Image (cartoon, grey):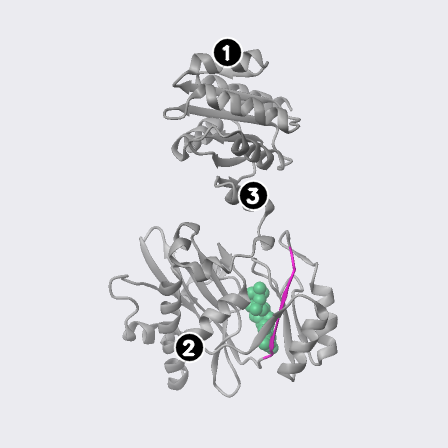
Amino acid sequence: MDIHEYQAKVLLRKAGIPVPPGEVAETPAEAEAIAKKLGGTVVVKAQVHAGGRGKAGGVQLAKTAAEARDHTSKILGMEIKGLVVQSVLVTHAEEIATEAYLGVLVDRKLQAPLFMASPAGGIDIEEVARSTPEKLRKLRVDPRYGLLPHQAYWIADFLYDDPDQIKQGAHIAERLWRVFIDAGASMVEINPLITTPSGEVKAIDAKLSVDDNELFRHLEIADMRDTTAEPPAEMLAREANLSYVKLDGTVGCCVNGAGLAMATMDLVSFYGGEPANFLDIGGSSNPDKVVTALEIITADANVKVILFNIFGGITRCDDVAKGIIEAMQRIDIKVPIVIRLTGTNEDAALEILKEAGCAAYTSMDDVVKKAVDLAGAA
Ligand code: GDP
Ligand code: MN
């Protein structure tokens, strides 16, 4: 789960990282009132879960409150990387001398948190890593000890020459580590971390992500979820307790069990198709769940065929077959559906599906080949 910049900034402030004052607004009038309260020049910033807002026109300086209102009416409703802006952060504008990058993420290869710092801030850190890797300092942090003070200095030393700024940078690095740990984050970053002409170090942008599986331990973060800012299919799936990941292919996959779901996607690729999604409907035959699953899959216009792959262990295949048929009666599906069921009560299940006129299989190879054929022909 991602949180908005204004929410991440609340966490940073609480941890003692200098962040300019600001508040979130959902209407131009609210933005104007906040700008008036802050006084002076403000920045109006689109709150969406995407980077590169500056380039997209979603970050605007406003010298007066009236200007803040006008910028807000233009930014609200704007689309940035497919996401519609529904709120803005109105924050005190800073004078910028330098822009740096500071972040922590969970590095899968290192199997540990990785601290990263770059004096080339303000731009995408992936871009820095690609084109000027010498401008990126990385530090694997041992989670048993956390970020040690001398390591925080080593990181800040890479960003600044001035001893006072190094000290400020080191304190910010230590506090950013606390934010990362306390939030159970998978990623937290400040980009840019600026210095002002008078030499103060401040965070003017912030990003934080937490793995969904971590949220039960961090209810205060879970409460920050803004479902209106997320892709609708993912929200539907989460509410129905389905694990869903959208992909770019044409074969919609509806499978029980995460391992079988991945094996199904592998086989789709093996036979020359491309899966449209990962979807684990879990071990239930509940038609409501199947309806939701079908709604999510068919909402994706790329889907040319729906492939069910069900292994009946504790779940009985005949129950699942009834669930599928009921679901198909409840919603109108325009693409072909192929079904593979195997396991407990599979004979009864095949009987039920055949009576209902559905293409049913017991072999995984056969059903996947058929699905890939249908997707190719469509
Ligand atoms: P992003 O593009 O989504 O990463 O949004 P940022 O918050 O990082 O803003 C993009 C750019 O806008 C920054 O790199 C700055 O150059 C500029 N910017 C943002 N806030 C301020 C500010 O308070 N003062 C000034 N002068 N520029 C700002
Ligand atoms: Mn940024």
Question: Which mark sits nearer the N-terminus, 3 or 2?
Answer: 2
Name above or below for residue 68 compared with residue 251: below
Residue 143 x, y percent position in the rendering: 28, 61
Report the residue that reaches farthest toward the bottom: 198
Q: Nearer the viewer, residue 265 or 134?
A: 265
Q: Nearer the viewer, mark 1 or mark 2?
A: 1
The reply to whether residue 274 is visible in this rendering is: no
Residues shaded magenta:
84-93
Q: Nearer the viewer, residue 346 or 63?
A: 346
| Residue type pointed to by label 2 | Gly
- Quadrant location of the C terminus in the rendered image: top right
| Residue type pointed to by label 3 | Leu
What residue sits right under mark 1 in the picture? 351
Question: Which mark sits nearer the N-terminus, 3 or 1?
Answer: 3
Residue 309 x, y percent position in the rendering: 47, 25
Gap in Å between the C-alphas at discs 3 and 2? Answer: 37 Å
Gap in Å between the C-alphas at discs 3 and 1? Answer: 32 Å
Dominant SS of magenta comes to strand
Cβ–Cβ below 8 Å for labels 3 and 2? no
Please say whether residue 260 is one of the residues in the magenta stretch.
Answer: no
Question: Quarter of the image holding residue 150?
Answer: bottom left
Residue 353 x, y percent position in the rendering: 53, 15
| Residue type pointed to by label 1 | Glu
Q: Nearer the viewer, mark 3 or mark 2?
A: 3
What residue sits right under mark 3 in the picture? 236
Question: Which mark sits nearer the N-terminus, 1 or 2?
Answer: 2
Identify the disc placed on residue 16.
2
Count how many numbered circles sit on residues in the image.
3
Q: Secondary structure at mark 1?
A: helix
Q: Residue at x 58, y 27 (%)?
A: 327
From the viewer's perspective, is 22 left or right of 155?
Answer: right
